Image (spheres, rainbow, N blue to C red):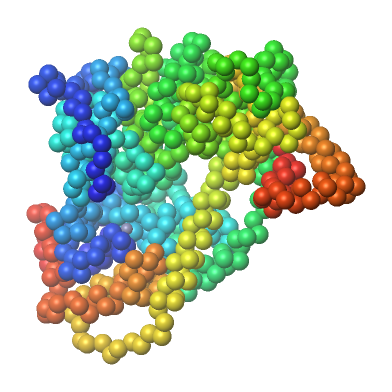
Amino acid sequence: MSQIKGKPARVQVDPNEFEEEQPPQTGTVYNIWYNKWSGGGNNHVLVKSKYKLDVERDSGYTRADKTQGTGYFCLFFAKGMCSKGKKCEYLHRIPRDDDVFPLTVDCFGREKFSENRDDMGGIGSFNTVNKTLYIGGVLTDRKDVQDRINGEFKPLGKISKINVISGKNCAFVTFKSESNAQFAKEAMNGQSLYGTDILSVKWAHEDPNPEAIRQKKRTIEQETQQVVLQLLDKYKRQRQDDGPHVEEPEEPEPVQVVQQLKQIEDTKPTTTSNTNGILSGVSLELLKRLPQPKPTDRKSLVNAYESSDDDDD
Amino acid sequence: MSADNKDDVPAVCETCLGPNPYLQMIRERGGLECKLCTRPFTVYKWAPVKNGPFKHTIICLTCAKQRNCCQSCLLDLTYGIPIQLRDAALKMAGVDGVQGASEPKNEVSKLYVANNSERFKSIGGAAVTSNRDKAKEILEKLAAVKGNRPSKSANAQKRDTLPQHIENIDVSKIVSKLPFNGSLEPPSNPELKTLFIFGVDDSLPEYKITEFFEQFGKLKSVNCQHGARCAFVTFTRRVDAEAAAKSISCPISGQSGLFLIENIPLRVTWGKERSLGTTNREKLKVGSIVTKFLKKLSKNSMNTTKRTNEEQTNNNEVKRVKSDTRKPAKEADFEKTFKNYEY
Ligand SMILES: [Zn+2]
Ligand SMILES: [Zn+2]
Ligand SMILES: [Zn+2]
């Protein structure tokens, strides 16, 4: 993040020529962020994209690389239509292995949902890790279709597996990381391999093939084992850090604050001063440093900018 | 019906709260719909870093308590890991009760479970990690579990039989053109810059193959077909392809070379890129033939090794040369992996 190398991000679209591109109106409200109409039915009409990302040519540093930005990727860059170039607040490159995002948002910073959309489009679910894209509208009877699919998807991230299903006009592309799958989904939806076709890129349903299920089980086992090892490691280090710990007699503390922290505390197993550890509880040191107002209710801590319709008691 | 009552404080993890001890939170009652049960709930917003971006709670307190997860990041409050992973880990440790209890599947049952929080106190492994002592105990239990994982059971049971309709497909034309019997000797055609790899396992991601060969130079293309268990790797420059081929050991000269990626034994020869089948079925059938061929090769090489061992015992000279090789331990490991691998 701090090291800025290479060229500035290219302006993909001239802001003067750029017309707000909206899909044909299929609803009553247009949502720029999700690029779709909502209300009045849910017909997604696939439109061929006017723009296309060229990773080599377009990538470069933006403001997001210089400041402590949000660290999210530019959705418009992915679609090949960001008019801001190096002035953009979002990242203009493809996600790397070290770009990790919270479970609850995608690499563009959009909030995920509890379930996938029925048509498997959209942002996706926070309950499943999905690294596989379903590519519809692939002209699988063309001779070089495999090469074209490879050529389009490989620049967008590390690939685990590509499978073109001839006869079904579709392909499955599995990325190493979920972020790259999210990025590629936005970058390739509405693109074309031969000029006449339009690709429709969605999340893949779980592969029902028994071999794939076994494969997934193995991956989960491996991941779980890794996590357990990490947890144990942290747990051990934490115990060492603790050492002989003498609890000092506590000063009278703001009652409400203690109460609040206690409640958070109750859901945690350990109380140590190591706040970075995964197993850390609420730090008692931290608690002692708190100011000593005489709060009469929790509002002193939880600053309440209540919604107006709320009755105050 | 609101999802929480007024006196509750949010369940948010330390990481989400941030380092600031003087944290201020904004509370909005009924501000959002819970992302799990869809009931409106009291939303808290705060900036973990001063003047930084805001975080907020996205699920209601009831749902969070049932899962023992953070209302903002949804990670387990005790272990700081995704709750699905937590439940998988606890299952591995053989913790009672985790197996049966699972996430409610649809909106209606989620709502039902959330509304009856008295009955559904905990979902998945929440009961374990919300208990301080139990959480510690389980970690120790898990420590005992690791290490005795059967690593090969997964390999042993796969790809045994193909369904009849795939078994019946004739792929002899495709297979006859593939250079299974090729070698690692540099071919006379200077334009040939492609290596043929077979034995690719479903668990071996393509980028691992790419990364391995990229060490030697820029790649023009990688065509990896997991179904057919084969891949073609084409270099931009011939010299790089030769360097890659040279780095791979070739136990029987004139035959395919052997190497390992992620402990998966692969065979490699020079060879022009050919079709590996167009339909999925064709690819699978090619894959099954590759498997049979690999079994045969590994049996042959075992016999060869046996013979060489006998020769060695009769010949001290050879024995000394053998012990002089730079990495005998590694080589032995290598051979072992090949011999013990069940295709
Ligand atoms: Zn941008
Ligand atoms: Zn809820
Ligand atoms: Zn959290």
Q: Total label count?
A: 0
Whether A72 is drawn above or below A251: the answer is: above
Q: Is residue A8 left or right of residue A212?
A: left
Q: Quadrant of residue B68?
A: bottom left
Q: Which residue is at a point 44% across and 55% down the rendered structure image?
A: B83
Is residue A43 in sight in this rendering?
no
Tell me if residue B172 comes above or below residue A161 in the rendering.
above
The answer to whether residue B98 is above or below residue A170 is below
Outermost residue toward the front in this view: B317
Q: Is residue B262 above or below residue B185?
A: below
Quarter of the view holding residue A302: bottom left
Residue at image coords 73%, 26%: B254
Q: Residue at x 16, y 59 (%)?
A: B50
Q: Nearer the viewer, residue B273 or B104?
A: B273
Residue B99 appears in the rendering: yes
Hey, which residue is sitting farthest right in the picture?
B314
Percent coordinates x, y for residue B271 in the rendering: 62, 20
Percent position of residue A51, x then y = 25, 20
B2 relative to A114 in the view: left or right: left
**Image quadrant for the C terminus of chain B?**
top right
Q: Residue furthest bottom?
A: A249
Position in image of residue A247 (x %, y %):
33, 87
- The residue located at (55%, 50%) in the rendering is A222
Seen in the image, is B211 located left or right of residue B67? Answer: right
Quarter assignment of residue A283:
bottom left
The residue lying toward the viewer, choosing from B263 and A219, is: B263
Between residues B41 and A57, which one lies in front from this camera angle?
A57
